[in-house]
Amino acid sequence: MTTFHERVFSGVQPTGNLHLGNYLGAITKFVALQNTHECLYCVVDLHAITVAQDPAVLKSNIREVTAAFIAAGIDPKAHIVFNQSQVAEHAELAWIFNCVARMGWLNRMTQFKEKAGKDRENASVGLYAYPTLMAADILIYRATHVPVGEDQKQHLELARDIAQKFNNDFAQSIANCGFGEAFFPQPEPLIQGPATRVMSLRDGSKKMSKSDPSDYSRLNLSDDADAIAQKIRKAKTDPEALPSELEGLASRPEADNLVGIYAALADKTKEDVLREFGGAQFSGFKAALVDLAVVKLGPIGAEMKRIQTDHAYIDAVLKDGADRARIIAAENMRAVKDILGFVR
Ligand code: TYM
């Protein structure tokens, strides 16, 4: 068995309205992993253009996600923070993976079906091939661990399938080039904790998302204390008091969601939260959740807004990160070319 150096990679799309789901499902995990791993965190702008983008808005969103990373506690000196389009090897490896992945695999991707909707004929080829670029993002660094929310699980499975097929198809050449039994690791998804799938505040059956037309469906990282309080107070609930046991949340998606959010913000388990609030009415629980959310999210939102205005600083962070990422990516790309038999 080839053993791989442990490395973390993850990405966030610069498509506006960074929300609590992105924060609890992904960004808080990014922050924690810095203590134990070498990490690369990427603003995936090439992914954003799989659907139409306004260039001026895209640029501002790239800076906003970068500012959110830093405001949340990611250290761009100790680790690597960059935007995808500055490291051309992502797109280069994605092409090679387009020739490794099978149509049948991509046809099963639920995210494409959801995003393309009924008008599939009119979706971009990029939207369809999105998962092969995502596999390339991870594997160009031969990353071993990928913190993501639950919705990215299927894409991670595809990345593992691509890595394995590449390793199998080119086994002989990989060995001949001196890489032993496998060139790519099987990247492991890290999907843990009480908020891996944060749901809409208006509808417990729908995921909290950047594109929901109702701003009341999500807590944006840029929301101030008043907005946070209003949205939580208006969040959909049911008439029952909170249960004391986890089983009592089973058919109550809105209650389950708010308990999960509270648990993640307080760094507790859902069981802990129910032990504390079991039997309480929503009015009391929501008031406690407002206080907690304002304390935890308020300062991050304010810091994000402050950093975001300093374009020179953010652009320098991204350039420096890209320069360091490119060194790793270029070395791995040279190896891939050798394995494939390209002349270089
Ligand atoms: P994106 O930009 O949609 O979301 C960024 C991260 O936030 C997580 N997330 C959620 N977690 C919990 N509850 C939610 N409601 C919620 N909504 C979003 C996502 O799971 C993700 O971790 N394809 C990716 C970006 C990407 C990527 C990568 C990720 C591109 N290349 C390589 C990992 C590795 C995406 O669209 O994330």
Image (spheres, rainbow, N blue to C red):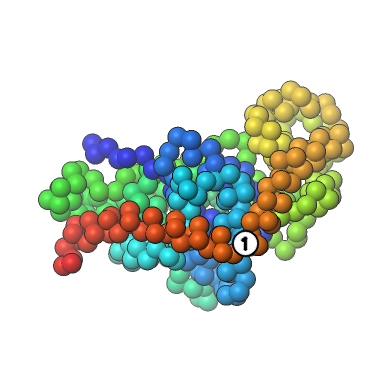
Q: Quadrant of residue 86?
A: bottom left
Task: From the top left corner, tell me how far across and down residue 197 is, in percent.
Answer: 61, 45
Q: Is residue 121 above or below residue 272?
A: below
Number of labels in the image equals 1
Q: Is residue 98 visible?
A: no
Please state which of residues 109 and 177 is positioned toward the viewer in this rendering: 177
Q: Residue at x 73, y 27 (%)?
A: 274
Name the side, left or right, on which 146 lies relative to 299: left
Q: Is residue 68 above or below residue 262?
A: below
Question: Where, quadrant-wise, is the N terminus in this rendering?
Answer: top left
Q: Residue furthest left?
A: 176
Q: Residue at x 84, y 38 (%)?
A: 287
Task: From the top left corner, tell me how far across and down residue 319 is, in percent.
Answer: 46, 61
Q: Quadrant of residue 256?
A: top right
Name the side, left or right, on which 37 lies relative to 262: left
Q: Residue at x 23, y 50 (%)?
A: 168
Q: Is residue 86 visible?
A: yes
Residue wearing tag 1: 310
Q: Residue at x 65, y 29 (%)?
A: 268
Name the side, left or right, on which 9 lies relative to 116: left
Q: Is residue 310 above or below residue 253?
A: below
Please state which of residues 164 and 342 is positioned toward the viewer in this rendering: 342
Q: Name the kind of residue labelled 1 in the image.
A: Asp
| Crowding at mark 1 (Cα within 10 Å: few <14, some 14-19, many 20+) | few
Question: Where, quadrant-wise, is the C terminus in this rendering?
Answer: bottom left
Task: From the top left corner, tell me how far across and down residue 10 is, in percent.
Answer: 47, 50
Mark 1 secondary-structure assignment: loop
Task: From the top left corner, tell me how far across and down residue 77 is, in percent.
Answer: 47, 48
Q: Is residue 56 above or below residue 221?
A: below
Please state which of residues 65 and 280 is positioned toward the viewer in this rendering: 65
